[in-house]
Image: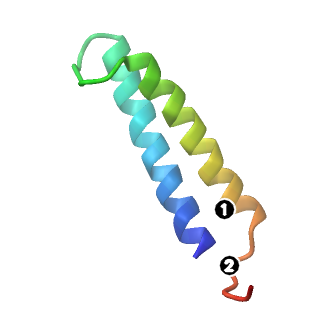
Amino acid sequence: MIKILGFILTIAGGIGLILGILSVFGSMEVGMSPWALIILGIVFFFAGIGLLKNKKDTDQT
């Protein structure tokens, strides 16, 4: 379950980074501030990578 969440956060962060960078350079217009997308993309991307690196995928609690 943790690996799935990490994968989703990594993909969402990558998409946010791409959209934010394209918006900053003017080739794409989104409804949010491009800097907000970049910051959220960085946070989600590194959170997802951290979950994928450090957590073992077990269903035991």
Gap between marks 1 and 2 measured at Cα: 9 Å
- Residue at point 45%, 23% (across, down): 36
Q: Quadrant of residue 17?
A: top left
Q: Position of residue 38 (x, y in %)?
A: 48, 25
Q: Which residue is mark 1?
A: 52
Query: Could you say where residue 12 lies in the image, as x and y percent from the top left?
Result: 43, 47
List x then y, in percent, for residue 45.
Answer: 56, 43
- Mark 2 lies on a secondary structure that is loop
- The earlier-in-sequence mark between 1 and 2 is 1
Residue 61 position within the rendered picture, expressed as x and y whole percent measured from the top left: 74, 85
Residue in front for this viewpoint, 31 or 38: 31
Q: Residue at x 34, y 11 (%)?
A: 25
Depicted 34 relative to depicted 46: above or below: above
Vertical position of residue 19 compared to residue 52: above or below = above
Residue that appears at 68% across and 59% down: 51
Label 1 residue SS: helix
Residue at 50%, 33% (x, y): give it.
Answer: 40
Circles 1 and 2 in contact, beta carbons < 8 Å = no
The residue sitting at the bottom extreme is 60
Disc 2: which residue: 57
